[in-house]
Amino acid sequence: MKMKSGDYVEIIKGVWDANMPKDRRDGLIVEIVGEKRDQVTVMFSNSVMLKFHKSQVSVLQNICTVESTKLK
């Protein structure tokens, strides 16, 4: 599944960082980074932002794209 900024994600089991919130592995993708665009920066509920490889992240919900319309 393609990942985009704003996607609601979960860090897979077995991957851990001391700065992640206790008992919460979910967050929002803030940006896609890396030379190969294969890493994501995730913001957690404690406002900490951490970088993970895409293989360490599972998308729970993609963002919805809403097209704006002009009023005539």
Image: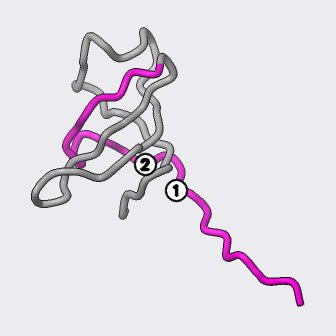
Residue hosting label 1: 62
- Classify 10 Å Cα crowding around label 1: few (below 14), some (14-19), many (20 and above): some
Please identify the quadrant where the C terminus is shown. Answer: bottom right
- Circles 1 and 2 in contact, beta carbons < 8 Å: yes
Q: Residue at coordinates 35% horizontally, 28% vertically from top-left? A: 49
Q: How many marks?
A: 2
Write down the quadrant of residue 38 in the picture. Answer: bottom left
Residue placed farthest to the front in the image? 72
Q: Residue at coordinates 31% horizontally, 34% vertically from top-left? A: 12
The percent position of residue 14, horizontal first and vertical second, equals: 22, 24
Residue hosting label 2: 59
Which amino acid does the dot numbered 2 rest on?
Val
Residue placed farthest to the right in the image? 72
Q: Bounds of the magenta span? A: 47-72
- Give me the C-alpha separation between circle 1 and circle 2: 7 Å
Q: Residue at coordinates 29% horizontally, 29% vertically from top-left? A: 50
Between 2 and 71, which is closer to the camera in this rendering?
71
Tell me: residue 62, above or below residue 30.
Answer: below
Q: Is residue 22 left or right of residue 40?
A: right
Which amino acid does the dot numbered 1 rest on?
Asn
Q: Residue at coordinates 37% horizontally, 58% vertically from top-left? A: 3
The percent position of residue 9, horizontal first and vertical second, equals: 44, 41
The percent position of residue 24, horizontal first and vertical second, equals: 46, 19
